[in-house]
């Protein structure tokens, strides 16, 4: 099974975008979360003897990878994306509360 690492392994930088751009950023994050959920689900449902390949970043080269390591990495990435999404939602909620006061 080939795994698109560009979707599975995201950049480590998780800077928050200014609030005027937060809605498009939030939608982008939501899309990435959905993609990452699919990756986690696919890796979770693979038979033990199936091979998993990881794509080198910015390349068309794939390397054999350990299925359990890839699953763990994918779950961690999903958790990070969810955390960032939640932070953006919380910022927007506090922004709305402040503007309504």
Image: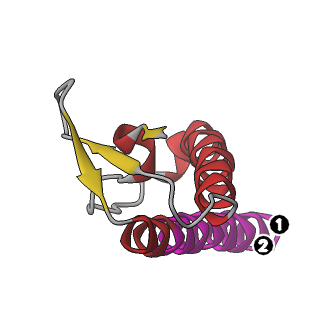
Residue furthest right in the image: 100
Q: 23 or 96: nearer the eye?
A: 23
**Residue at 27% of width from left, 63% of height from top?**
12
- Whether the residues at callouts 1 and 2 have beta carbons within 8 Å, the answer is yes
Quadrant, the C terminus: bottom right
Front of the two marks 1 and 2: 2
Residue annotated with mark 2: 97
Q: Residue at x 59, y 36 (%)?
A: 24
Q: Position of residue 53 (x, y in %)?
A: 34, 45
- Identify which residue, 44 or 79, lies in the foreground: 44
Disc 1 designates what residue? 100
- Tell me the magenta residue range: 75-101
Q: Quadrant of residue 6?
A: top left
Label 2 Cα neighbours within 10 Å, binned few <14 / some 14-19 / many ≥20: few
Classify residue 73 as left or right of residue 83: left
In percent of width and height, residue 2 lies at 43, 37
In-image side of 72 versus 92 (left or right): left
- Which class describes the residues within 10 Å of circle 1: few (<14), some (14-19), or many (20+)? few
Indicate the secondary structure of the residue bearing disc 2.
Answer: helix
């Amino acid at each position: 099974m080939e795994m698109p690492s560009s979707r599975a392994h995201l950049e480590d930088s998780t800077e928050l975008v200014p609030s005027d751009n937060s809605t498009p950023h939030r939608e982008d994050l939501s899309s990435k979360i959905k993609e990452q959920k699919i990756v986690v689900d696919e890796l979770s449902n693979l038979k033990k003897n199936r091979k998993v390949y990881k794509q080198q970043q910015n390349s068309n080269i794939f390397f054999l990878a350990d299925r359990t390591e890839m699953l763990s990495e994918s779950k961690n990435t999903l958790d990070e994306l969810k955390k960032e999404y939640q932070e953006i939602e919380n910022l927007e909620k506090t922004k709305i509360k402040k503007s309504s006061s």
